[in-house]
């Protein structure tokens, strides 16, 4: 279902505005019924500003254990994936697609590309908002397993520096991990 001209490549700082636009649309749409709107607004405004995305891309480009990938079709960003090892353990931070490209297999192609790039024995983590059952199933198909839950606001405050409103309700996140036997 995806187009023949789909290209997977490393993101460049020049892609930041297109990536930010997808994130600013996809995140609120994905979590509208799962997370308080003030929490979504805080996260999106701080992590999807084009300048924040450009800095993240630059950090990933300068590291051997990080990837910021985009799927591009007809010279337009159709989706992106951000993975890095800058925190206490390797983490798949985000994977979002342009709403018009969802269901076309692009997310799976991005996951396959990530798994082609990271060592076969690398374990990593991912957080999924509780209630986002489709995402849990998607990541399970790609080898991740549910391990428990964490407080999302605490996690994103401590590890990513996101500042949330003081009265923001907690957000339960499902901790998933890719475990490699061996």
Image (cartoon, rainbow, N blue to C red):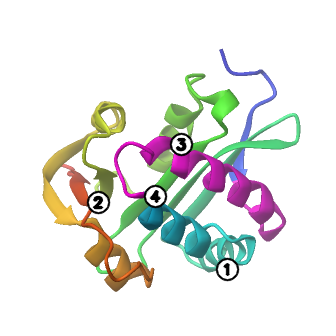
Q: Residue at x 53, y 65 (%)?
A: 41
Q: Is residue 99 magenta?
A: no
Q: Residue at x 75, y 21 (%)?
A: 3
Residue lying furthest right: 75
The residue labelled by disc 1 is: 55
- Residue 17 position within the rendered picture, expressed as x and y whole percent measured from the top left: 79, 62
Image check: 12 left or right of 53? right
Image check: 117 left or right of 124? right
Q: State which tag comes first along the sequence, 3 or 1.
A: 3
Q: Residues within 10 Å of mark 1 (few under 14, many from 20)?
A: few
**Labelled disc at residue 138:** none
> Residue 40 or 55: which is nearer the viewer?
40
- Residue 117 position within the rendered picture, expressed as x and y whole percent measured from the top left: 51, 53
Name the mark nearer the viewer: 4 or 2: 4
Q: Residue at x 34, y 47 (%)?
A: 34
Quarter of the rendering occupied by the N terminus: top right
Q: Residue at x 44, y 83 (%)?
A: 163
Q: State which tag comes first along the sequence, 1 or 4.
A: 4
Q: Are marks 3 and 4 in contact (CB under 8 Å)?
A: no
> Residue 153 or 86: which is nearer the viewer?
153
**Labelled disc at residue 125:** 2
**Labelled disc at residue 37:** 4
Image check: 33 left or right of 42? left
Q: Residues within 10 Å of mark 2 (few under 14, many from 20)?
A: some
Q: Are marks 1 and 4 in contact (CB under 8 Å)?
A: no
Q: Would you say residue 182 is visible in this rendering?
A: no
The residue labelled by disc 3 is: 29
> Residue 135 or 59: which is nearer the viewer?
135
> Residue 77 or 6: which is nearer the viewer?
77
Q: State which tag comes first along the sequence, 2 or 1.
A: 1
Disc 2 to disc 1, C-alpha distance: 22 Å
């Amino acid at each position: 279902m995806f187009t023949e001209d789909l290209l997977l490549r490393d993101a460049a700082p020049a892609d930041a505005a297109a990536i930010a636009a997808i994130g600013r649309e996809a995140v609120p749409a994905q979590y509208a019924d799962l997370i308080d709107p003030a929490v979504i607004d805080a996260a999106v405004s701080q992590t999807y500003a084009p300048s924040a995305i450009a800095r993240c891309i630059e950090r990933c480009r300068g590291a051997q254990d990080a990837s910021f990938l985009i799927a591009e079709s007809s010279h337009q960003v159709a989706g992106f994936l951000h993975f890095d090892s800058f925190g206490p353990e390797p983490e798949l931070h985000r994977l979002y697609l342009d709403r018009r490209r969802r269901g076309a297999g692009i997310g799976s192609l991005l996951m396959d590309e990530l798994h082609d790039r990271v060592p076969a024995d690398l374990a990593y983590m991912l957080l999924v908002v509780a209630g986002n059952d489709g995402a849990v199933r998607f990541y399970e198909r790609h080898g991740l397993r549910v391990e428990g839950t964490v407080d999302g606001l605490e996690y994103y405050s401590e590890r990513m520096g996101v500042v949330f409103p003081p009265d923001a309700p907690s957000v339960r996140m499902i901790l998933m991990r890719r475990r490699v036997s061996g």
